Amino acid sequence: MLSHQRAFKRPLLNCADPATDLFSSEMAVLAHDNSHDPRLIYANAIALRLWERSWQEMIGMPSRCTAEEEAREQRASALQRAHNQDAFEGYSGVRVSRTGQRFMINNARIWTLWDDKGQNCGQAAAFSSWSWL
């Protein structure tokens, strides 16, 4: 949550219990590591429901698999833009659930995650607007 504050100059959530409140938030929040083929390291309850996956199915999955193959290049461009700028706001794109259900995410924020030593350790995204296609 500190990385979001750093990137956007505002908190992701205003809350007393960040871990619990983030997981149960009304906005979808996901994060992946910074490996060559980034793997998901976090998905809150809304994200798990949208992608129709359990925690065990979602965590460790290549994050590219959250999008249909046809949408992956656009997704990669948005992630690169966020990497270059440290953050990017206003991203929209089509995603696909485990069962093939397609949905559009709107006005997503994407930002770089930093560890306590100031090292890039991945990226996160949050959005509260989506529609089923």
Image: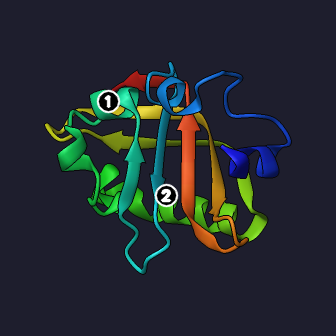
Look at the picture and state if 123 lies above or below 108.
below
Question: Can you tell which quarter of the image residue 79 is in?
Answer: bottom right
Q: Depth-wise, is mark 2 or mark 1 nearer the camera?
A: 1
Residue lying furthest right: 9
Residue at image x 37%, y 75%?
37
Look at the picture and state if 46 lies above or below 119.
above
Residue at image x 43%, y 77%?
35
Using a 10 Å C-alpha cutoff, classify the residue at mark 2 as few (fewer than 14 neighbours), some (14 to 19) or many (20 or more). many
Q: Position of residue 7 (x, y in %)?
A: 78, 51
Q: Give the CA separation, mark 2 to mark 1.
A: 17 Å
Q: Position of residue 29 (x, y in %)?
A: 49, 38
Q: Which dot marks residue 75? A: 2
Q: Nearer the viewer, residue 105 or 12?
A: 12
Query: What colour scheme has been applied to the protein in the rendered image?
Result: rainbow
Question: Can you tell which quarter of the image residue 24 is in?
Answer: top left
Q: Position of residue 69 (x, y in %)?
A: 29, 60
Q: Nearer the viewer, residue 47 or 106?
A: 47
Secondary element at image label 1: helix
Q: Which residue is mark 1?
A: 50
Residue at image x 50%, y 72%?
34
